[in-house]
Amino acid sequence: MDVRLTSEQQQLRDAAAKLADDLGPGSVADLDDQNRITRLEKAVGDTGFRTLRSDGASGVEVAIVAEEFARGLVDVPFIGPVLADDLSGRIGREPSVAEGPESVDLTKSLAGVVESPAELGELSEGDAGRWRALALTVTCADLVGSARGAHALAVDYAKVREQYGATIGSYQAVAHLLAESLTLIEGSISVLRHAAWAVDELPAVEAIEAAKVAKIYCARAALTVCETSIQVHGGIGNTWECLAHVYLRRVLAATEAWPVKLEELSIGLS
């Protein structure tokens, strides 16, 4: 597989990133801004991001959007609708829709998600497996995006917060924590990209296996990155006003959606 993004995929990433940066919440208070949420909902609907699969998009392209939306804490439904769109294409009609599970995630990223839709029973084993691989992969993308956002938040804070006459980012103890987080993110991007490619390119059984490996790796890495972000923020990182806990909540929610245990894997993962 070629892990490089095509020019069209890069344009898709740029478009998703711009939408997230322009209309995503910039603070915890923004989560209650209904005017912003209305504009965000309209923008996501108008772009057609939720119907990527019926428009012929690959698993890689769905993951690209999911990752950027999580990085920007986009707080309108995407995962649920895009999976429903994939399922509708496989069954030839609109599937059942859920209101969305209760979640600790303040951005409600799992709104509309149905983890085990009844319609899966109408599909062949291969099609049902491929849908499940996509579901696992899109939550991995959410984890990676959340980790990237939490890391960027910590880096920005480390550049401006001063202690003993110097920014805290200039101290090795903080710099090494941030460097380790970046390493975890890079590893997560690699396994995510493979899982996203596998959704359409490998047999369903192998695609699910790739997605399970990615889910375990990305969940572990994202949790560590979010905890590091809170640590770098110091006392303020434990307050309601700091966005670090919003990223952490999103990671916890994504981890519990289609959860995977290490013993489920048929290949090693240390």
Image (cartoon, rainbow, N blue to C red):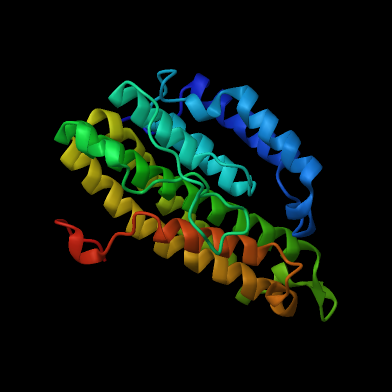
Front-most of 62 and 13? 62
In the picture provided, is 164 more to the left or to the right than 170? right
In the picture provided, is 235 more to the left or to the right than 139? right
At 73% from the left and 58% from the top, the residue drawn is 156
Residue at the extreme right of the image, as rendered: 165
Q: Quadrant of residue 264?
A: bottom left
Identify whether 260 is placed above or below 214.
below
Q: Position of residue 254 (x, y in %)?
A: 46, 56
Identify whether 71 is placed above or below 246.
above
Q: Quadrant of residue 226?
A: bottom right
Q: Quadrant of residue 2?
A: top left
Q: Quadrant of the N terminus?
A: top left
At 42% from the left and 60% from the top, the residue drawn is 255
At 41% from the left and 34% from the top, the residue drawn is 84
Identify whether 180 is placed above or below 190.
below
In the picture provided, is 60 more to the left or to the right than 246? left
Q: Quadrant of the C terminus?
A: bottom left
| Residue 58 seen in the current view | yes
Q: Position of residue 250 (x, y in %)?
A: 55, 58
Q: Position of residue 36 (x, y in %)?
A: 78, 41
Front-most of 88 and 63? 88
| Residue 4 seen in the current view | no
Q: Position of residue 10 (x, y in %)?
A: 54, 27
At 33% from the left and 59% from the top, the residue drawn is 259
The mark total stands at 0
